[in-house]
């Protein structure tokens, strides 16, 4: 029986309440101050905090501690040390010093560092991020940390995220000051909706492709797919329900506000959405959630697939990044106001986001680029690879009238003049949804739908925060100089909305006309990862990150290289796995089955019975298998043609290796439909998707 939720919630987290209870008053105050101001932690205070943390952790059964960080691979990393410290009399005591809390030294050499490898020594250090609480997982006290090289280059995803949050806070505060508001800090808030598949572990174990690549590389369409739409919000299988309850409980213990659990569109696809938090904590929590999902699934005889496209022919999995900005006083800056003055402020922030998304379409696209996500974007189920924004018809009407200078006349709404004191009343009901838009305004936040299910959302939020910080900086620069603020504000909003209106698209993003229209508008259409990633270090992007102190050029180059390298490695593993399955499982199965049929023909003939149907099948299978062998050789040859240079190789993989893989798959899938079920070497799509 589950403990009471309030009791359970956060029970494994060294949170506010625990700090207050366990730390001396002065220490608690000093720590709170550090957290609020983002300053460095005093060594003496760290000692007291570390000791309290250790005692608390030991009471909860912990024996080890680790600095928990997010290297550039996108997963999280840990290096466990025990609290044990030997005494001279042969016994041990449990110790944890302030120094150990503040700083750790993992060996950085085995993490990808891109071009940075040449310029930094193998060791790096981790530094506690006191804005994210320590927690206990698997009897280990985990300390969320940032990860840097000794020469100062950042080697993780948390540090740039914190920097980008700092950047947007600084610029947003400047803008708010112009509206007469004294705000010390502004934070970006994020609520990531996480999609995933659950499949039976026994089936999984029989599929080398799932084991090695996280997705099926072969598999004919089952007789039933997602066409009946009976899974979405349908009843949850009892086994899955038990998993979800267990998952909620585990997440709650870690202070993660898991709120919604439901089925998704594809068979055996589900979603978990937490209540939003600051971008930093939401990122940590999402990383943890993905890990916990996998562990809990295992306990229930499932495997949780976080790949963007585990199955062809049914929807893939994404992660909707709900994003907003709010002040330390809790004012959501993307919430349309009710008074004209509030509207003016809202419109300025809205304009900042619109400008940011238009100016940095490439960075947003790059932040979601991977071999896995390439299967989703533009595949008529997820947003297209073209970045555009949807603001709802009503808001679009307001923007149109601001741009054209015409009166805003919405049905039943009062008309308005253009001028700050009489800016329009923004309609409160922005509930109309456009599911095909990559970047949709949903009432008081934006929902970026391009991230893939396995992504670390830090990347996307680094781009968003920094790009919006940049718009706000330009606006503040201009408005701070204005003599007549109201007039300057109105003209700025009008000018910027006119300049960036091309990014707004309220139509169907899946339609065949949209890419043509988007091209006319001059929007980018970066279809694949290799096409997108090369733009990362474009001059304007390098300048952006330098302006806000988020990344240096070498840090960006290393990230560009790592993304491309990962793409190349993934395609290589997929191609090798395809070859392996073709040669060792699929082709032998086809040969074996046709031999069985051939023997049937021979036996029947020997007793004077003709077997034309079987004979024809033998011929057909033999021909198709021969063709499949040819395609297998072609794939092998394609793979051998890959070049050393990572950028060239990425493009080559995209243009040559992937099509060769797809050609072989197509024929193998056709063969699957012609071979007896008992002779097919791996579980079929029907087995995988419709387990009981
Ligand atoms: P959907 O209809 O897309 O499922 P929901 O209303 O369930 O939308 O919300 C999706 C996510 O958006 C949730 O994680 C929620 O906490 C988050 N969210 C709500 N408000 C904000 C906000 N101001 N900033 C960031 N995320 C938010
Ligand atoms: Mg959503």
Image: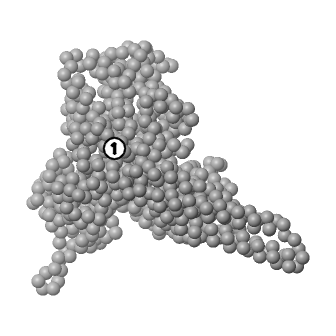
Nearest the camera: 224 or 646?
646
Tell me the quarter of the image containing the C terminus.
Answer: bottom right
Q: Secondary structure at mark 1?
A: loop
Task: Give the residue furthest to the right.
Answer: 608
Nearest the camera: 474 or 642?
642
Residue 72: x and y in percent read 32, 56
Q: How is the image coloured?
A: one colour
Residue 520: x and y in percent read 47, 28
Q: Kindly identify the residue that appears in the image at 15 percent across and 49 percent down.
A: 39
Residue 52: x and y in percent read 19, 64
The answer to whether residue 341 is seen in the rendering is yes
The residue indicated by pointer 1 is 536
Q: Where 574 falls versus 139 (above or below)?
A: above
Nearest the camera: 539 or 264?
539
Q: Kindly identify the residue that appears in the image at 43 percent across and 32 percent down.
A: 523
Residue 18: x and y in percent read 24, 59
Q: Dot 1, crowdedness within 10 Å: few (<14), some or many (≥20)?
A: many
Q: Where 164 falls versus 348 (above or below)?
A: below
- For residue 173, what is the image quadrant? top left
Q: Kindly identify the residue that appears in the image at 54 percent across and 60 percent down.
A: 635
Nearest the camera: 465 or 371?
371
Task: Give the residue furthest to the bottom.
Answer: 89
Ligand 1 under 8 Å from disc 1 Cβ: no
**In the image, 254: left or right of 131?**
right
The answer to whether residue 237 is seen in the rendering is no
Tell me the quarter of the image containing the N terminus.
Answer: bottom left
Q: How many marks?
A: 1
Q: Kindly identify the residue that appears in the image at 55 percent across and 32 percent down.
A: 513
**In the image, 258: left or right of 462?**
right
């Amino acid at each position: 029986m589950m403990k009471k939720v309030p009791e359970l919630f956060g029970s494994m987290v060294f949170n506010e309440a625990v700090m207050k209870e366990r730390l001396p008053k002065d220490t608690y105050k000093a720590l709170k101050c550090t957290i609020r101001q983002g300053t460095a932690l005093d060594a003496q205070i760290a000692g007291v905090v570390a000791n309290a943390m250790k005692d608390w952790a030991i009471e909860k059964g912990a024996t080890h501690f680790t600095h928990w960080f997010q290297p550039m691979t996108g997963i999280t990393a840990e290096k466990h040390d025990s609290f044990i410290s030997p005494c001279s009399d042969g016994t041990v005591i449990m110790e944890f010093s302030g120094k150990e809390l503040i700083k750790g030294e993992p060996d950085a050499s085995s993490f990808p560092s891109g071009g940075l490898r040449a310029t930094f020594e193998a060791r790096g250090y981790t530094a506690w991020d006191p804005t994210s609480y320590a927690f206990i997982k698997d009897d280990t006290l985990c300390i969320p940390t940032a990860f840097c090289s000794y020469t100062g280059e950042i080697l993780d995803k948390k540090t740039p995220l914190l920097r980008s949050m700092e950047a947007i806070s600084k610029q947003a505060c400047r803008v708010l000051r112009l509206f007469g508001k004294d705000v010390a800090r502004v934070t970006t808030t994020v609520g990531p909706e996480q999609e995933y598949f659950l499949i039976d572990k026994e089936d999984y174990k029989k599929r080398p492709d799932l084991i090695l690549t996280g997705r099926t590389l072969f598999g004919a369409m089952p007789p039933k797919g997602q066409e009946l739409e009976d899974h979405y919000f349908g009843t949850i299988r009892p086994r899955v329900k038990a998993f979800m309850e267990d998952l909620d409980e585990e997440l709650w213990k870690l202070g993660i506000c898991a709120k919604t659990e439901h089925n998704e569109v594809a068979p055996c696809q589900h979603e978990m959405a937490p209540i939003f938090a600051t971008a930093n904590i939401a990122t940590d929590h999402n990383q943890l959630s993905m890990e916990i999902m996998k562990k809990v699934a295992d306990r229930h005889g499932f495997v949780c697939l976080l790949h963007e496209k585990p199955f062809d022919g049914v929807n893939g999995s994404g992660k909707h990044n709900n994003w907003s900005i709010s002040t330390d006083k809790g004012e959501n800056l993307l919430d349309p106001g009710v008074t004209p003055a509030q509207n003016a402020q809202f419109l300025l922030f809205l304009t900042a986001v619109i400008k940011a998304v238009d100016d940095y379409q490439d960075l947003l696209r790059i932040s979601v680029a991977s071999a896995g996500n390439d299967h989703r974007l533009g595949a008529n189920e997820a947003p297209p690879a073209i970045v555009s924004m949807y603001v709802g018809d009503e808001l679009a009407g307001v923007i149109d009238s601001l741009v054209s200078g015409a009166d805003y006349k919405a049905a039943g709404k009062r008309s308005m003049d253009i001028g700050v004191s009489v800016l329009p009343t923004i309609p409160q009901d922005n509930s109309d949804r456009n599911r095909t838009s990559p970047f949709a305004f949903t009432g008081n936040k934006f929902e970026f739908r391009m991230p893939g299910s396995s992504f670390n959302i830090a990347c996307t939020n680094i781009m968003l925060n920094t790009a919006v910080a940049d718009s706000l900086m330009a606006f503040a620069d201009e408005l701070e100089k204005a003599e007549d603020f109201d007039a300057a504000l109105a003209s700025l909003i009008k000018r910027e909305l006119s300049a960036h209106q091309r990014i707004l698209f309220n139509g169907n993003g899946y339609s065949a006309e949209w890419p043509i229209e988007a091209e006319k508008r001059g929007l980018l259409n970066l279809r694949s990862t290799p096409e997108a990633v090369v733009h990362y270090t474009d001059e304007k992007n390098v300048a952006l990150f330098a302006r806000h102190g988020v990344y240096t050029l070498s840090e960006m180059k290393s990230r560009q290289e790592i993304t491309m390298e990962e793409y190349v490695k993934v395609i290589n593993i997929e191609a090798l796995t395809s070859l392996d399955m073709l040669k060792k499982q699929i082709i032998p199965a086809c040969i074996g089955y046709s031999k069985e049929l051939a023997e049937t023909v021979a036996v029947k003939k020997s007793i004077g019975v003709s077997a034309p149907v079987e004979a024809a099948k033998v011929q057909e299978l033999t021909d198709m298998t021969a063709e499949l062998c040819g395609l297998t050789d072609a794939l092998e040859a394609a793979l051998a043609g890959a070049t050393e240079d990572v950028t060239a190789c990425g493009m080559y993989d995209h243009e040559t290796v992937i099509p060769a893989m797809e050609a072989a798959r197509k024929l193998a899938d056709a063969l699957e439909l012609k071979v007896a079920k008992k002779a097919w070497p791996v579980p079929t799509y029907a087995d995988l998707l419709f387990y009981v």
